[in-house]
Amino acid sequence: MTLSKVSLAVAMSGVLGLTACDTMTDPNNPNRNAQTAAAVGAGLGAIVGASRGDNVGERNRGAIVGALVGAAGGAGIGTLLDRQEAELRQELGSNATIVNNGNQLIVTLPQDILFATGDATLSGALRGDLTALASSINRYPDTTVNVIGHADNTGGAVFNQDLSARRAQAVSSVLIQSGVSPNRIRSTGRGEDAPIASNLNAEGRAQNRRVEITITPN
């Protein structure tokens, strides 16, 4: 069924209105990601709701109901991510970088602390942090965890791919040993394919050597 111009306008105005409110939010607001998730959920709900109904009135009512339901669901996910982010920042301190994009948490650990050069055997330096991370993951059971190893471009691409995969698996093994269900964890090596900084200098290469643990609500 094709959306009428009126019902589509209702849906899109809901998206734009909520997004505008979010852009005015204080960037230091601890609930900013919950608000962003609510806006996204409302927009999607409005569009889905507007596609249902046999006439303009029904489709407009569907857009409004869909926006409300979507906002509630999105806000719930955003709130949980905000809460887990705050807990992890307190538990991990400066050893990890944590990014909350409103859809998932990305916890980045530097490989230079986790591993010796060219090795996939975990050092003892951050084992306590990995145990704390595992405890946090277990407190929020309705999530999927991706452990992704990354390398710089020093050495051959095949070697870097294999090394990044083995390092990701080593981190995954500690999380599993600390009680996280293996069914929730996916381990991947990206090698040198996804740099976040320049590989032309030592500082950039150090940033590219990392393990990222992404925590995504189901």
Image: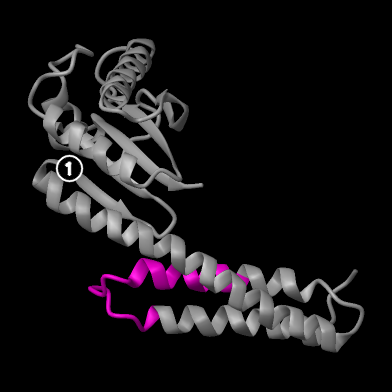
Q: Is residue 181 left or right of residue 120?
A: right
Q: Residues within 10 Å of mark 1 (few under 14, many from 20)?
A: some
Residue at 34 percent of width and 19 percent of height: 169
Q: Examine the rendered structure and indicate whether residue 135 appears above or below residue 187.
A: below
Q: Quadrant of the N terminus?
A: bottom right
Above or below 81: residue 29: below
Amino acid on which disc 1 is placed: Ala
Residue 128 vs 51, above or below: the answer is: above
The image quarter containing residue 160 is top left
Whole-percent x, y for residue 128 in the image: 12, 31
To which quarter of the image does residue 63 belong?
A: bottom right
Please state the horizontal and vertical placement of residue 177, each as a whole percent of the image: 27, 21
Q: Is residue 198 visible?
A: no
Image location (x, y in percent) of residue 34: 40, 68
- Could you tell me which secondary element the residue under label 1 belongs to? loop
Residue drawn at the location 32% of the way across and 20% of the way down: 164
Residue 97 appears in view: yes
Give the residue displayed 39% in from the left and 79% down from the top.
Answer: 23
For the record, the magenta segment spans 23-43
